Amino acid sequence: YADDIRAGLAYLRGRPEIDGARLGLVGHSEGGMIAPMVAATDPRLKGIVLMAGPAYTGGRILAFQQRNAVDNARSLTPAQRKAALEESARATDSLARQSGWLRYFISYDPVPTARRVRAPVLILQGETDQQVTPEQADTLAAAFRAGGNRDVTMRKFPATDHLFVPDSVGDPARYGALVSRAVRPGVLGTIADWLVAHLR
């Protein structure tokens, strides 16, 4: 997937109507893992925006998501919870055997890559995100800064879920019941303002 983005950047840089010196990336969730991979190898990028980008291995994230989903299913008995977790783990293992991306995602640690990024970084996080938990934004910001990056901005949005929509709970099982699925205007405004400032 990172190579797909590199190919896209190469294509844009070859277009006469595009200023190849003014390109940045915006990545959400797994895209927030891929953008730093590209930035770590592309010094021409003017910046990256990470929306709910992970700071943990995919294995740790999936284990949390599975446990959280079971914990939120209040009607399950303790025995049913245990069985559901075991089945989720088996299903993940089975899928990983079939998917090269999932195998990679499970073991990939984003922190060492973040330490190699020199492009400016904007990290956005919803405070009720139950898919990529909010403290991961702090971990990412610390990793970018630990590598010597001096242009790292982080912003968290209260009552905002993984999709960056207003949501006081953030449970993925309840997304369908949300009153609105529109991204918060403040999120979009923050991205637009930051990109204008950094892509000039």
Image (cartoon, rainbow, N blue to C red):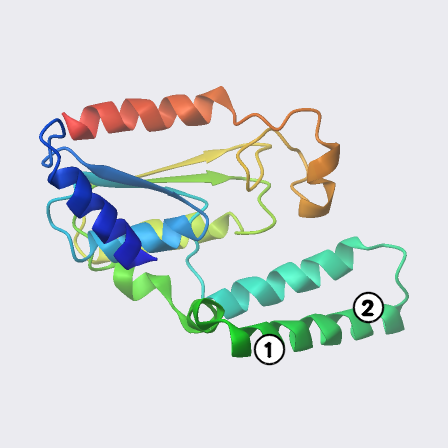
Q: Which residue is mark 2?
A: 81
Q: Inspect this view and state whether residue 119 appears.
A: no
Relative to the observer, which residue lies in front, 10 or 158? 10
Q: Secondary structure at mark 1?
A: helix
Write the residue at 39% across / 49% down: 31
Q: Which residue is mark 1?
A: 93
Tell me the amino acid under the disc marked 2: Arg
User: Is residue 148 toward the left or the right of residue 67 in the image?
Assistant: left
Write the residue at 11% across / 36% down: 20
The CA distance from mark 2 to mark 1 is 18 Å
Quarter of the image where one finds residue 179: top right
User: Is residue 79 toward the left or the right of residue 138 in the image?
Assistant: right
Q: Position of residue 193 (x, y in %)?
A: 29, 22
Q: Position of residue 151 (x, y in %)?
A: 20, 40
Write the residue at 58% across / 38% down: 161
Q: Secondary structure at mark 2?
A: helix
CB of mark 2 within 8 Å of CB of mark 1? no
Tell me the amino acid under the disc marked 1: Asp
Instruction: Please determine whether, in this image, residue 181 is positioned above or below residue 63.
Output: above
Write the residue at 36% across / 53% down: 140
